[in-house]
Amino acid sequence: MTRTQLLAQVHQYFDTGGLATDLNRRLGWRTESDLGPDAPAATQTALRGYLSEEILPWLSRLGFEVQIHDNPVAGAGPLLLAHRVEDPALPTVLSYGHGDVVNGQDARWREGLSPWTLTIEGDRWYGRGSADNKGQHSIVLAALEHTLQARQQRLGYNVTVLLEMGEEAGSPGLAAFCEQQRRALSADLFLASDGPRAQASRPTLFLGSRGAVNFSLRVNSRERAYHSGNWGGVLSNPAIRLSHALASLVGPQGRVLVPGLLPPPPPERLRQALREVPVGGGIDDPELSPGWGEPGLSPAEQLVGWNTLEVLALGAGSATRPVNAIPPNAVAHCQLRFVVGTDWTQLQDHVRAHLDAQGFEEVQVEVSMACGATRLDLDNPWVDWALNSMQASAGHPAVLMPNLAGSLPNDLFADGLGLPTLWVPHSYPACAQHAPNEHLLGSVAREGLAVMAGLFWDLGEPGSAPWVSGRVHPSTTAA
């Protein structure tokens, strides 16, 4: 079978309802991982069942040896690790996905839609996980299966698949698991699908992601509220103090004002790549805010090549039922999204020193979650190889995003395992991935099947892929 015939085969799989059938079955698993300690027992059953009853049989049929592991973190979702080894001396591709989803928010979906059933309306395929990430790893697995068939079960390389069930809860235990399974995860290339395309109409390749640090600022002034008439003017208001503290961190147009939280200037090679990256303008995309953020940067540079400090939530008193009282405390939950080169591990120290210098010694700083930023070198030979393969499959050029604007646990693969990382997303920015009415676009899925099948095919073509020559791996089945 030829490459052209393979692409026709995956298109037929889509056109005859194969992907819709597989995805509908997978959406039916209520794999919500972000429900917290009050999650019903059925949730844990679903998280494990998705791996053992849905993914394991599929991969076993493709010749994988599959194991399901308990999470190193008690109570967190299990992980699946699968190996298909043609020869330990061949290069290995590591792929990743997650079968968990955010909470369904069932009551908030539009009439006629359910988060747990695939509903197709025109180009939109509705369902929780259709875009993030069940639809995406379903595209990857289907493309891999058809490539195996086209190559008569001989790819010319090995494949390892890692699937977690806790990404939407911050990937608890994933770092520890990757460290424990370092030898089993040994590979030459990381290739996976998550996140959105730059635009629905353009296949996209990104090489890493911005990092994220979530932190909270708190002002605890006293144990209880006091009447604003009897005590207003002589008691400090924690909401006012916190508001001014926030204003010292980020300006009225969103510019970060703490030097220690800024990245180095974008290198020229990065700025050149970002000139081709569109931002906004698609269906359901919000209107951009002119003049927002760091002056002198384009929207793509702001989104992909710079840092942003966001206030995610504010709390003081009761916004829904205010009373005439000075609140006793106030809190702001904040997030720094950052790019490579940022001194993010010292965020707490930078914020603490800045607040003290501004006279806000009473504001407490608490860091709750952090993951690093990554970006494969834009001159790495895998970049042009992947872009050429994607164009050959899609029939038009792909967009190169140096890194995703959002965050993924890519630091575990790029830094922890030392792998070149290629991400090929099959969603789009307005997919409502964490909101009601989440959806995949059928047109993107159809093209994505061809793009992934083309990549898997080209990886096995002699002399095509820029494998590091002479590298021999230990058996990938060893832990």
Image (cartoon, helix red, strand yellow):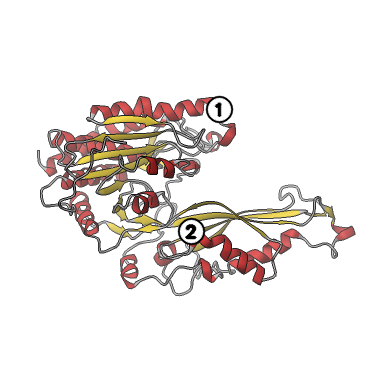
Element type at mark 2: strand
Horizontal side, residue 147 vs residue 207: left or right: left
Q: Residue 178 appears in which quarter of the rendering?
A: top left
The residue at the point 31 percent across, 53 percent down is 418
The reply, left or right, for residue 352 in relation to residue 219 is: left
Q: Is residue 298 above or below residue 191?
A: below
* Residue topped by disc 1: 40
**How far across and down, in percent of the image, does residue 444 sit?**
31, 46
Q: Where is residue 429 drawn, in percent x and y?
A: 41, 52
Residue type indicated by callout 1? Pro
List x then y, in percent, for residue 24: 37, 30
Q: Which comes sooner in the sequence, label 1 or label 2?
A: 1
Q: Marks 1 and 2, how far apart in space?
A: 32 Å
Tell me the residue at 77%/50% (across/down). 322
137 vs 90, nearest the viewer: 90
* Quadrant holding the N terminus: top left
Q: Residue furthest right?
A: 230
Amino acid type of disc 2?
Arg
Examine the rendering and report whether any part of residue 146 can be seen: yes
